[in-house]
Image (cartoon, rainbow, N blue to C red):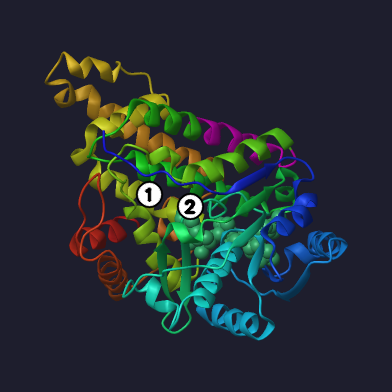
């Protein structure tokens, strides 16, 4: 077991009408003026934005607004936000939306609290030393940005998608009403469920140490998402299933399911970020399209975790992995390989069952060999040359996985 640092300062208000408490929570921050930041229009169509404005006005909270955040949020809007906030003397940012709006808010908050170009942080050429505080009204369960230390921004020029992690950007509060996610298109609900699963899977597939308690939490979370994603596929208005998925979104990416392990793998995320940058695909769908190829490429280097995943998460009938403690050749037995491959196939079957792609063709992109090479090169550069814990991946490995995913 590894030592760990677990920091989750975000105050959560969860349940029906949670967003109605926005005025009180903003008031507690004693901000002078806030930026109301949102996306491409869903919050206008649903009436949520008007309700938030009314709640702020009721408490005499001054605000200015900036909409137009797109999925794979752009650096150009971040710069616009920074300029606007400087002009308006904003000292708090309220994100009303999903991962893209929250991440754009985090980038604006870094830009305001630090000198110089905010993109430096995403290129990892220097570290942020401060951030403005952020609050969230969540409208989609997916990225987990409402509690995470991460933000992912795409630079318009060259469409370079990069993430930056720091505890400084964890939101002060998040208001989470599962009902707000009922207006999501089915595709976005499924993309969200995929991303949530992946945030725990990335931490679970490790060749380093791990903790029994963390494994149990991770496996419980993954089984819960698998079950409730199917309920939502058949009945998108099921409140309890919306609630299970929404809470899973936060717990999957706030660090909880990685405590005591080696830091996780995150190679599928690295590979997807290049795909998302180059082809502007939905993040969850990009992950689903790559995961099976990644899993088939790396499992031999991480057989104990893949075996456990098959049995404990995908519920493939197989002997208890505890037997490995008394049988040193356990992982060389033929049934182990069979179980692992059945586990990978079961996950891909699940993706298909919620209409997620399991390869790039199904995702709707057809990269050329040159584009595959560019993505592998960029992915390896962004990772500092090597990525992954289940198996260490170098540029050539990344290229092989992209090719397998065609
Ligand atoms: O822009 P609007 O009109 O609001 O539409 C959005 C958007 O088109 C729509 N939507 C959101 N809530 C809705 C709704 N439509 C109807 N009703 C609602 N209640 O859904 C679409 C997707 O929204 P987006 O915010 O992009 O989704 P998501 O939360 O999946 O965020 C994706 C972004 O987060 C990054 C991804 O790479 C991607 O850029 N990630 C951020 C992470 C983090 N900060 O911790 C971790 C993740 O691994 C991920 O990389
Ligand atoms: Zn993700």
Viewer-proximal residue, 385 or 332? Answer: 385
Q: Quarter of the image holding residue 108?
A: bottom right
Q: Quarter of the image holding residue 117?
A: bottom left
Is residue 236 rendered magenta in the image?
yes
Looking at the rendered structure, the secondary structure element under dot 1 is helix
State which tag comes first along the sequence, 2 or 1: 1
Q: Which mark is residue 388?
A: none
Judged left or right of residue 362, residue 44 is right
Give the percent coordinates (x, y) of residue 265.
30, 48
Viewer-proximal residue, 151 or 235? Answer: 151
The N terminus lies in quadrant: top left
How many numbered circles does the render carry? 2
- Image vertical order of residue 311 relative to residue 82, above or below: above
Judged left or right of residue 110, residue 335 is left
> Which region of the structure is painted magenta?
223-237
Residue depicted at 47% across the width and 73% down the height: 154
Give the percent coordinates (x, y) of residue 123.
35, 74
Q: Is residue 14 visible?
A: yes
Viewer-proximal residue, 339 or 3? Answer: 3
**Badge 2, how many Cα within 10 Å: few under 14, some, many 20+?**
many
Name the residue beneath numbered marker 1.
Answer: 291
Q: Is residue 406 visible?
A: no
Give the percent coordinates (x, y) of residue 195.
49, 49
Give the percent coordinates (x, y) of residue 286.
45, 58
- Image vertical order of residue 282 relative to residue 114, above or below: above
Q: Quarter of the image holding residue 61?
A: bottom right
Residue depicted at 64% across the width and 45% down the height: 12
Judged left or right of residue 117, residue 35 is right
Q: Which mark is residue 357?
A: 2
């Amino acid at each position: 077991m590894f030592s760990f640092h677990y920091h989750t300062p975000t105050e959560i208000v969860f349940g029906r009408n949670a967003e109605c408490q926005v005025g009180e929570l903003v008031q507690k921050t004693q901000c002078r003026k806030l930026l109301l930041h949102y996306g491409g229009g869903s919050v206008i169509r649903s009436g949520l934005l008007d309700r938030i404005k009314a709640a702020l006005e009721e408490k005499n909270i001054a605000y200015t607004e900036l909409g137009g955040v797109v999925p794979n949020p752009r650096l150009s809007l971040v710069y616009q936000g920074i300029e606007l906030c400087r002009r308006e003397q904003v000292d708090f940012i309220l994100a009303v939306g999903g991962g893209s709006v929250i991440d754009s808010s985090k980038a604006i908050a870094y830009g305001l609290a630090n000198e110089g170009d905010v993109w430096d942080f995403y290129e990892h050429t220097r570290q942020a030393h401060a951030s403005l505080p952020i609050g969230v009204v969540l409208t989609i369960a997916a990225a987990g940005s409402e509690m995470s230390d991460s933000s992912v921004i795409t630079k318009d020029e060259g469409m370079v998608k990069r993430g930056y992690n720091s505890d400084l950007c964890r939101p002060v509060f998040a208001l989470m009403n599962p009902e707000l996610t009922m207006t999501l298109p089915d595709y976005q609900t499924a993309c969200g469920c995929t991303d949530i699963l992946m945030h725990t899977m990335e931490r679970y597939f490790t060749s380093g140490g791990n903790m029994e308690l963390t494994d149990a939490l991770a496996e419980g979370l993954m089984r819960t998402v698998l079950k409730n994603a199917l309920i939502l596929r058949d009945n998108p208005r099921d409140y309890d299933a919306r609630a299970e998925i929404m809470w899973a979104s936060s717990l999957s990416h706030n660090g909880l399911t990685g405590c005591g392990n080696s830091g996780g793998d995150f190679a599928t995320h690295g590979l997807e970020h290049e795909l998302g940058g180059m082809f502007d695909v939905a993040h969850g769908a990009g992950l689903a399209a790559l995961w099976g190829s990644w899993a088939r490429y790396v499992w031999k280097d991480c057989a104990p975790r893949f075996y456990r995943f098959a049995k404990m998460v995908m519920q493939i009938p197989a002997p208890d992995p505890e037997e490995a403690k008394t049988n040193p050749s356990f992982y060389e037995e033929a049934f182990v390989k069979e179980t692992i491959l059945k586990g990978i196939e079961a996950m891909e079957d699940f993706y298909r069952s919620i209409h997620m792609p399991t390869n790039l063709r199904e995702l709707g992109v057809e990269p050329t060999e040159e584009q595959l090479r560019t993505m592998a090169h960029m992915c390896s550069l962004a990772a500092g040359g090597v990525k992954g814990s289940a198996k260490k991946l170098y540029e050539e490995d990344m290229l092989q996985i992209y090719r397998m995913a065609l």
